[in-house]
Image (cartoon, rainbow, N blue to C red):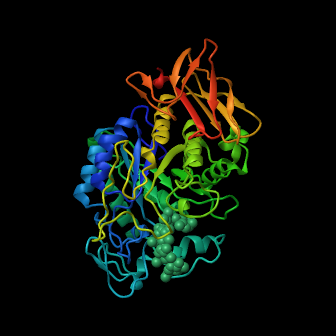
Amino acid sequence: QHNPHWWGNRNTIVHLFEWKWSDIAQECENFLGPRGFAGVQVSPVNENIISAGRPWWERYQPISYKLTTRSGDEEEFGDMVRRCNDVGVRIYVDVLLNHMSGDFDGVAVGTAGTEAEPGKKSFPGVPYTAQDFHPTCEITDWNDRFQVQQCELVGLKDLDQSSDWVRSKLIEFLDHLIELGVAGFRVDAAKHMASEDLEYIYSSLSNLNIDHGFPHNSRPFIFQEVIDHGHETVSRDEYKDLGAVTEFRFSEEIGNAFRGNNALMWLQSWGTGWGFLPSGQALTFVDNHDNQRDAGAVLNYKSPKQYKMATAFHLAYPYGISRVMSSFAFDDHDTPPPQDAQERIISPEFDEDGACVNGWICEHRWRQIYAMVGFKNAVRDTEITGWWDNGDNQISFCRGNKGFLAINNNLYDLSQDLNTCLPQGTYCDVISGSLIDGSCTGKSVTVNEHGYGYIHIGSDDFDGVLALHVDAKV
Ligand code: QV4
C-alpha cells in the first residue's frame, strides 16, 4: 500500500496542520489544485478530549470515532474530500490506532459531546472497556519491544490491536473514511503497534471509493510514523513492506547539512546512499509537526533562508514521497492553533501576495516553496545528471533536460557558467520571481546551445537557491 494515488504529474503532499475542513476545501480549489499539489495530510478527524488552553496535541487523544473535532464535522469533512478530489488533490488522514486519550480526572467530554472515563479505560462512544487495552505500564526503555508496543506512550491508554473487537472497530473507522473518499492514512505511533496487527488491519480495509475517481481495486495509501534513528530494537524495516514509513533520518540530515554542519557537496549521494529507506518506501520531510518544535538539527520556518534551501533540495532531488509542512506560529510545544475568544479555530487570511497573515505560517504559500512543487511536477520521471559542486557548500544539478537547481550556502558568491542541461533559451528563476504573462519578475538565465548558462547567487541574496525548468521558459 505504497501508492499515493496522485493525479496526473503531481507529486507533493502538504500537511495543513490544524486547518478546518472548510478552509482546506477552499484551499484545494483556490491554491493547491492550480499550483499542482498532489494531496493534503489533514489533522486527526475523530473526536478528541478537550484540554485546557486547547493545545494542538489534544487531537492525539481520542474519545470516539465520531467525526467531529475543532476542524469541523462529518458533513464538512465529506464536502472537503469531494471538493479536493474534484480538483485532483487527495486527502490523507492522520489516524490514531495505537491509543485513546490519557488520564483525566473523572468524566471527560469530547469534541462531539461524548462522555468517557479515560482513567477507567471506559470509552462508551466506541465502545471500549478496560479489557480492550493493554495493562497500564510506562515506557522507560525505548529499546524494550514489550514496553514500546504494550505500555503507554506518554500515558495514552494503549489499545490491544490483537483483539478482534479492537481490530473490528479500527477497520470500521478507516473504512468509513475510505467511503468518504480519502486516499489513505498517516498511521500515528505505528512503532508502538506490532507490525503483524497492522498488517491484518491494512489488508482488511476496503478498496478506495470509485465514486471519488479512484480506479477499481485501488488500495489505500499507508504511511506509518516510525521514528528510527538507526540501531533501534523496533525498526522501520518491520513496517516498510506494509506501507511507506516516515524517514526521520532524512529530516535530521537535511537539517544538519543546511545548517552548515555538513558540506552540501556530500548530498550527491543523497537517499539510500545515506542509509535511508528505498525511495518508494520513504515518506520524506524537512520538518514535521513534532520535530519542528524540538531544538536540534531540524529546520523550521523560523530559519527561513536555510529552510527554503533545504526545501528546494528536498523537492528537486528525486528521492522519497515528499511532504511539505504548513504550520501555525508557535512559541512553545503547547501553543494552540490560531483561535478566537471562544476557542474556535480561525480561518487563515491572506495578504495581496497570497501570504498568510493571522498566525498561520502557510509555508506552502511561500513562492520559493510552491514554485518547487511546480518544479518537481515539471521534471517528473527524469534522472539526476550533471552534478557540480565547488568542493564545499555550492552545488548544482540537472533533472534530465527539464530542470536545473543551484544552491549557494557559502558565505561568498556563486558566479559562474554551469551546465543546466536545458534546451537553448531564456528561463525564469522561479525562486527569485515568477513567469507572469511571458516575462520574468526575478532573475533570468540565458542558456546557450551547449546547455550552459551564467549562474549568480550572491551570498547575501534574499534566497540561496536558483531553479529553472522547462515550464518556466521566457
Ligand atoms: C504527561 C507526562 C507523561 C505521563 C502522562 C500521564 O508527560 O510522562 O505519562 O502525562 O499522566 C500530551 C502532553 C504530555 C502528557 C500526555 C498525556 O504533552 O505531557 O503526558 O499528553 O496526557 C502528541 C504530543 C504529545 C502529547 C500527545 C497526546 O506530541 O506531547 O502528549 O500528542 O496529546 C515518540 C513516539 C511517536 C510520537 C512522538 C511524540 O514514538 O509516535 O513520541 N509521535 C506521535 C505524534 C505526536 C503525538 C503522538 C504520537 C501521540 O506525531 O504528535 O503526541 O498520539 O517518539
In the image, residue 104 above or below residue 314:
below
Q: Residue 119: name its quadrant.
A: bottom left
Residue 297 occupies quadrant: bottom right
x, y percentage for residue 315?
Answer: 54, 39
Residue 470 sits above or below residue 71 on the image: above
Q: Residue at x 62, y 23 (%)?
A: 420
* Residue 161 visible in the current orientation: no
Q: Nearer the viewer, residue 474 or 8?
A: 474
Q: Is residue 386 visible?
A: yes
Expressed as whole percent of the image width and height from the top left, the position of residue 435 reads 43, 27
Q: Position of residue 127 (x, y in %)?
A: 32, 75
Front-most of 452 and 122? Answer: 452
Q: Is residue 192 above or below residue 327?
A: below
Q: Is residue 388 shown above or below 308? A: above
Residue that protrudes farthest toward the bottom in the picture: 106
In percent of width and height, residue 24 lies at: 32, 50
Q: Is 262 left, or right, of 357 in this rendering? A: right
Left or right: 234 as drawn, with respect to 293: right
Tell me where residue 447 sits by quadrant. top right
